[in-house]
Structure formats: structure tokens, C-alpha cells
Amino acid sequence: MARLASHFEHVDFPVELALPHRVDDFLRIADRMAEVRDFVLGRGIEVLSVHAAQGKLSADDYAKWAEPAMQLADEIGAKSVTFHPNQSKHNRQNDQISARRHLRALQRGRLALAAVETFGGHGRVLRPEEIVAKGLPLVLDTSHIHDDERIRRLIREYHQNIPAVHLSARTGSEQHLPIDAFCLEVVGLLQTLKWTGSVILEYLPWHHYRTKADLRLIERFLHGEQNLEIPPPDDRFKDEPDRWGYGDMGDG
């Protein structure tokens, strides 16, 4: 738990709890989820969602890594669990049927929503518009879709079934950068639609120092403040992993 304690140092805001992204790494600690639960509850950390390991939703062994994420979410009061739609290049139709069946099984008897994250490529077992067409809970990631109008359309047409938004900026070559003007536009559109889900700032680790300042900036925007100055991305800590925490070093 020492690593977990270090990661959550300076965290005094609601979060998404990300489990190890490699399935093999997660399975090595899967039997310690009760410790994770006790740590979160003991620290009084508000967890909005849990991000499951990046396993294959369409595979027969999905439950060994996906079920513990759903159980943990219910035990700590998270509203949703984020699942990546796995790559499927050769038998996508059958894989999609399997993934949907597994998502239904994961949802059965659970309070937290089993939600599928958006990716812009064509090789995923569930593409964004297919998530919508099948009526599945959708986690909208603004860095994974490189088409602003497509993001606007997904929000307008499907906001009622989006439990969480992973908010970050992107360029042609980089993703998960600190927020920009389009990110504020997304937040404004959600506010207009009276959306009640969770906004999670999902940044590359060397940008975590911006999280608190950017949350304050979003709050000011939601309260009607105009002409806000958004600092550009700054890679100052990219080569200093010891400083990849949530210490408040940004401008307020």
C-alpha cells in the first residue's frame, strides 16, 4: 500500500481509481483488492469511477480481471467502471457479441455501471457509434477521438448514457495533455444539457501537477467567468518521475 499512499499524496479532489493496466500486473495483486478498498475508505477518498485493467472484454477469461474491478467499485461507492474495448481485427462481429454478453454479465447485480471507453480507430471491438447503437454506458475520452464535431455529436445524442468524461487536450501527435479551449467547450455543452456525470482530468503523469489548478479553472468557467487564460502544456517534469504527483504547482 506504500505505492498507493504515495500516489494519492496531495489528492483532495474526486478521482478515478486506475488499476494496473496490464492484466498480468493486475492479477498479481487481485487478491489485495480488500486492502485497496480499506485504504480508499480509510482515507475518505471520493472515487468517481474505477478504471479496469486493459484485458480483452471479448475473451472467455474476462471475469478474472473484470469482476474484481466491478466489486471494488461497488464497495467504495464508485458510479462506474471504465473498460477499454479490445482490438479485434479478424472476427470482430463475433468478438463484439461476446463482449456485449460479458458486459451484461458484469452488470448483473451491480450498482456501478460497466461502461465502455471511446477510441477513434476502426480496429476496436466496439467503436463509439456502436456503443451508442447498442445502448451501452459510454465513457467519452476527448483525447481518443480526433474529431471535435464527432465528440459534440456523441454528447448531444447520448449524454444521458455517459457516466463519465475523460477530459484532456490533444495535438496531432500527443494525447492526454492539460485542458485547452475545446475542453472548456465540452464542459460548457455538458452543463447546457444538464448532464450529471463525472469529469475526470486524464493527463500524462508529468502533467499531473496541473490537475488542481485546472479543476479550479473549470469551476470558474462553470460559474460564468469569461476570457479565462489557459496555460499551454509544459513538459517541465517529463524527465523527473519523482515529481509526477498532484502537488499544486500550477497557477490558480
Image (cartoon, rainbow, N blue to C red):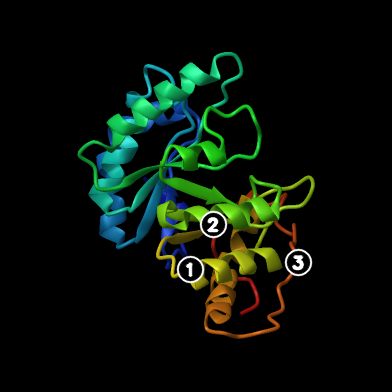
Q: Residues within 10 Å of mark 2 (few under 14, many from 20)?
A: many
Q: Amino acid at mark 3?
A: Pro
User: Disc 3 on helix, strand or loop?
Assistant: loop
**Residue 119 place in picture, x, y as percent:** 60, 39
Tell me: residue 246, above or below residue 59: below
Name the residue beneath numbered marker 2.
Answer: 155
Q: Quadrant of residue 197?
A: bottom left
Q: Quadrant of residue 121?
A: top right
User: Disc 2 on helix, strand or loop?
Assistant: helix
Which residue lies at the image location 32% right of the left edge and 53% below the top edge? 78
Which residue lies at the image location 69% right of the left edge and 55% below the top edge? 148
**Residue 73 place in picture, x, y as percent:** 30, 46
Name the residue beneath numbered marker 3.
Answer: 232
Which residue lies at the image location 35% right of the left edge and 26% below the top edge? 101
Q: Amino acid at mark 1?
A: Leu
Name the residue beneath numbered marker 1.
Answer: 193
Instruction: Tell me which numbered mark, 2 or 1, is placed earlier along the sequence.
Output: 2
Q: Quadrant of residue 90?
A: top right
**Residue 48 place in picture, x, y as percent:** 38, 57
Instruction: Tell me which numbered mark, 3 or 2, is placed earlier along the sequence.
Output: 2
User: Disc 1 on helix, strand or loop?
Assistant: loop
Q: Nearer the viewer, residue 181 or 48?
A: 181
Q: Is residue 135 left or right of residue 239?
A: left
Q: Nearer the viewer, residue 111 or 206?
A: 111
Mark 3 or 2: in front is 2
Q: Amino acid at mark 2?
A: Ile
Q: Residues within 10 Å of mark 3 (few under 14, many from 20)?
A: few
What quarter of the picture does the C terminus occupy?
bottom right
Tag 2 and tag 1, C-beta contact below 8 Å: yes
What quarter of the picture does the N terminus occupy?
top left
Instruction: Tell me which numbered mark, 3 or 1, is placed earlier along the sequence.
Output: 1
Instruction: Spot the residue most to the right.
Output: 172
